[in-house]
Amino acid sequence: MLTALVAAVLILGGTLFVLNRPDALPGADRTAQARVAPPDGTATATAPTPAAPASPAPSAPQSRPPASAAPAPATPTAPPAPTATPQPGGPENPPAKGAGTFTVAQGSADPVGRGTVRRYRVEVEDGIGIDPAASATQIQGILADKRGWTNDRRNGFQLVSAGAYDFTVKIASAATVDRICGAAGLDTHGEVNCNVGNQVVVNVKRWTIGSPQFSGPIDEYRALVINHEVGHRIGRGHESCPGPGKPAPAMMQQIYGLKGCTANAWPYSADGSYLSGPAVP
């Protein structure tokens, strides 16, 4: 009896020892931290869920470059003004006196006509408003025209600007013409042209204004001036009107009146006939 009692006490004491060991408590193998209840007995607060990172504030929309304004319609560039071709004529009121010096027109041309070819050059007095090169071109065209002196098949001409030459065509002021022609005993009284020595001397007044007796265009009157003075160079003398209504001969002094003839600048007609008149003594 006593033995049974002692055994029971020993068993009960062993059980209490085991129950007081901490590793014998349930859940002792978990590593999670214990949560302590708040002292006021309220419900256990759960750890706040970490807030999701705040979304970055939307950046302001990048400013786009402003749309290019529609290009203004292009203004067409005005074409450059054409360069004026130098004209052989001068001012409407040419100066009565030039510089007294001359410029030789540069340039040359092939001979025209048959027979004796006379080389000539063109000179223009400085300060009278006449273009030398343009004048030389016009004179060359006059002497090469089929209505001119080459039609006789005995005379030819060649424009040159250097080397030997047979005569000079000079366009000069009235004062210079009077001086050159007067030295040979001719009185041009500030109005007309002359042929002296190896010079055909043309009054700029006649070259630019023409003559009140000549009803044609100025280019025709220039042809008359050249044909008349060069005619003297090849041996032609003055002629008169052959009859009323007929073309005045190129060798007629038409500036002094037409005497019933019609104005004419050329020695020959278009069909090759010589336009002659009675010789003037």
Image: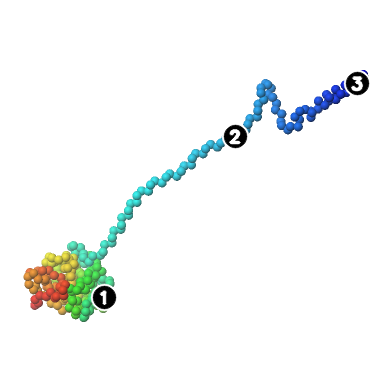
Q: Are marks 3 and 2 in contact (CB under 8 Å)?
A: no
Tell me where residue 71 appears, x and y as whole percent.
37, 48
- Give whichever of 144, 255 is nearer the camera: 144
Secondary structure at badge 1 equals loop
Residue indicated by mark 3? 4
Secondary structure at badge 2 equals loop
How far is disc 2 from disc 1 in space, using C-alphas? 104 Å
Q: Are marks 1 and 3 in contact (CB under 8 Å)?
A: no
* Res. 52 visible in picture: yes
How far is disc 3 from disc 2 in space, using C-alphas? 68 Å
Amino acid bearing label 3: Ala
- Give whichever of 275, 33 is nearer the camera: 33
- Give whichever of 161, 150 is nearer the camera: 150
For the C terminus, give its image quadrant: bottom left
Q: Nearer the viewer, mark 1 or mark 3?
A: 3
Q: Determine crowd level at label 2: few under 14, some 14-19, many 20+ residues with C-alpha closer than 10 A.
A: few
Residue indicated by mark 2? 52
Which of pointers 2 and 1 lies earlier in the amino acid sequence?
2
Residue indicated by mark 1? 110
Colouring mode (rainbow / by chain / secondary structure / one colour)? rainbow
Examine the image and state in which quarter residue 253 appears.
bottom left
Tell me where residue 108 appears, x and y as whole percent.
27, 73
Amino acid bearing label 2: Ala
* Res. 101 visible in picture: no
* Image point (60%, 33%), residue name: 51
* Image point (14%, 77%), residue name: 236
Secondary structure at badge 3 equals helix
* Image point (13%, 70%), residue name: 264
Is 108 displayed left or right of 36 in the figure? left
Amino acid bearing label 1: Asp
Examine the image and state in which quarter residue 212 appears.
bottom left
**Label annotation for residue 45:** none
